[in-house]
Image (spheres, rainbow, N blue to C red):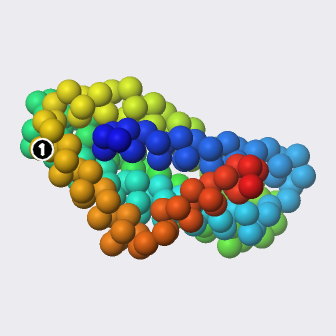
Amino acid sequence: MTPTEQLKHEHQIILLVLKGAEAEADHIQETGEVDKAKIGKLVDFFRNFVDLCHHTKEEKHLFQRMCCSVPQADRPVSVMLQEHEEGRRKVAALAEALAQSGAKAARAVHDILLAYAALLRQHIAKEDNILYPMADNGLDSQDQQKLSEAFEKVESEEMGKGVHEKYHQLAHELAGQS
């Protein structure tokens, strides 16, 4: 599996969780009730799998290699980095809203879940359809091999052994497929 194929696979896991997040937002809309445990698991997934694992692979490895090796990669990479930061702000706001109680907090959780899901859906489409093909066309086999090794290191050393798989399981639970 190439590095971009691995990232696309992670996107599928993320999209699965976004469906669960959107379903949870629908539940909040219908009932006014926030399942704090479930939203807490979503925050955990967003912070650890999406940001610390997936975005780390992109920011520390793929994007840097692209900016050095792929002509005209700077602008799309800059946009992706801005969207990563926007996602971090939304997840922080979600965690903050989750710590509150009442109807106003429930509305905030609802709104942030939907805004985060919309942001990530658009972001993933740009990466899958524009950025990753650009990487595949511009990076040579040596670059690809180095990226694969770096991605493996992120999972084993930065995330920890078995953590990546733990989040795959959590994704299925959050999507209601456990």
Q: Which residue is mark 1?
A: 142
Which residue is rendered at x = 65% and y = 65% of the image? 41
Residue 48 x/y as whole percent: 48, 65
Above or below, 134 against 154 in this view is: above
Task: Tell me: 125 left or right of 148.
Answer: right
Task: Tell me: 40 left or right of 137.
Answer: right
Element type at marker 1? helix
Question: Can residue 97 be seen at all in this image of the molecule?
Answer: no
Task: Tell me: 44 left or right of 146.
Answer: right
Residue 131 x/y as whole percent: 30, 32
Q: Nearer the viewer, residue 133 or 121?
A: 133
Query: Given the current orientation, which residue lies at the most extreme front position?
Result: 1
Above or below, 145 against 127 in this view is: below
Query: Number of marks in the image?
Result: 1
Task: Tell me: 16 left or right of 92.
Answer: right
The N terminus lies in quadrant? top left
Q: Nearer the viewer, residue 73 or 107?
A: 73
Query: Alpha-carbon neighbours of circle 1 within 10 Å: few (<14), some, or many (≥20)?
Result: few
Question: Can residue 32 be seen at all in this image of the molecule?
Answer: yes
Which residue is rendered at x = 66% and y = 67% of the image? 40
Q: Nearer the viewer, residue 70 or 168?
A: 168
The C terminus lies in quadrant? bottom right
- Residue type, label 1: Gln
Which residue is rendered at x = 20% and y = 43% of the image? 144
Query: Given the current orientation, which residue lies at the most extreme right position?
Result: 31
Residue 101 x/y as whole percent: 77, 70
Residue 146 x/y as whole percent: 18, 52
